[in-house]
Amino acid sequence: MSALENQPSPKRRLLLASDRTDRSSELAGILQSVGEVDTISTLDIPEAPADHFAGIVVDINLRSPESVQLVRNKLRAEAYRSMPRLFVLSDGLHHGSMQAWALGATDTISRPFDAQGILQRIRSAFPDTVRFDATASGKALNRGIAAAHEVMVKIFEKLPAGIPLTIGDVMQAENQILKAVKQSSLREWLTTVGRHHTDSYRHCLFVTGFAVAFAQHLGMREDDQRRLTRASLLHDVGKAFIPLAVLDKPGKLTDQEISVMRQHPRLGYEALVAQGGFPPEMLDVVLHHHEFLDGSGYPNGLRGDQISDIVRLTTIVDIYTALVEKRAYRLPFTHTEAFATMEKMGGKLDPHLLHAFRPVALGTR
């Protein structure tokens, strides 16, 4: 059992800033089930909030230039630079969403409120305050997961809305992710991600954790660790363009749906190429992480030496992660079952890398 699991479940401290506090009472009630909430007027947003606050929730009229400018001025303070901020959208219109991201939103929620959905977003966006402050490794862990989560938001919410994703966005997160796994442990990374994330976010963060731990286990140079971190974070970027009815389907996919899902490597590759600035090895991983050495993979049916080392490594981590994750249509494989299944895949995977991955995989049991 990890050190995090031994600790009592702490309460978050949240600021709820609203331009109509009476209208925010329902939201405050929902937030109180996962944290202590200080509800204040946007006029009263402090210049220097106490350091025990995990984050700020902003509930304003995003169509009001006065409210927007007031919040922008308040949140420019240095004390808010690294504080997660969640904005409330009153409708599904593009304008409100764009305005929230322009104000530095870490994440968004929408009216009418779905209590369970909001609580999930809160747990993802804001760390548990007491746990966050408990130890240096705890700080590193939560900062790393928060940084990785921010990249996921940019991939799955901003990118489909036409808001660019840049290599700089990914590079900002890599230091914190590497420190998180190194200073805590892969086990604690997986435990915390599993507690606060679901579906596509969770899968990408699991893959990233395993990839970083694998790179550190192999003794890769720091530059190579960074390249692998970036690539693993982005490997499933194409899923941002897959219809949610397919991506989040609570059951097995039909043959037609599988065909749609298999478009994600090329969709992700094309999106990043169009954006520009992403290095070849990242594009290689995005496009080819479902290729197999025997030529049976997709989308290009590559074989043997046509598949780079970074792709071979990411493929192993991606498959292993998928097997040990819980899916709506099956229970997760145990770590031993998952590794044994991969050993039976014969010539599809790099046998030397798979053997080297064994202590990383089985060490998380």
Image (cartoon, rainbow, N blue to C red):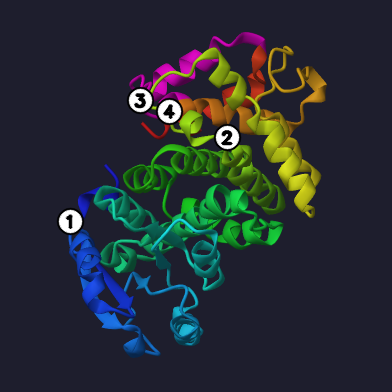
**Alpha carbon separation for disc pair 1 and 2:** 39 Å
Circle nearer the viewer, 1 or 2: 2
**Alpha carbon separation for disc pair 2 and 3:** 18 Å
> Could you say which disc has been placed on residue 8 in the image?
1
Residue 329 covered by magenta stretch: yes
Magenta span: 323-347
Label 4 vs 1, first from the N-terminus: 1
Residue at image position (54%, 43%) is 208
> Could you say which disc has been placed on residue 231 in the image?
none
Residue at image position (60%, 56%) is 174
Secondary structure beneath dot 2 equals loop
290, 180: nearer the viewer: 290
**Alpha carbon separation for disc pair 4 and 1:** 34 Å
Secondary structure beneath dot 3 equals loop
Image quadrant of residue 215?
Answer: top right
In the figure, 110 relative to 255: above or below?
below
> Could you say which disc has been placed on residue 328 in the image?
3
Whether residue 278 is visible here, answered yes or no, is no
Circle nearer the viewer, 3 or 1: 3
**Alpha carbon separation for disc pair 4 and 3:** 8 Å
Mark 4, other Cα within 10 Å: few <14 / some 14–19 / many ≥20: few
Secondary structure beneath dot 4 equals loop
> Could you say which disc has been placed on residue 242 in the image?
2
Label 2 vs 3, first from the N-terminus: 2
Contact (Cβ within 8 Å) of mark 4 with mark 3: yes
**Alpha carbon separation for disc pair 2 and 4:** 11 Å
3, 175: nearer the viewer: 175
Image quadrant of residue 67?
Answer: bottom left
Q: Which residue is mark 4?
A: 249
Indicate the amino acid at tag 3: Ala
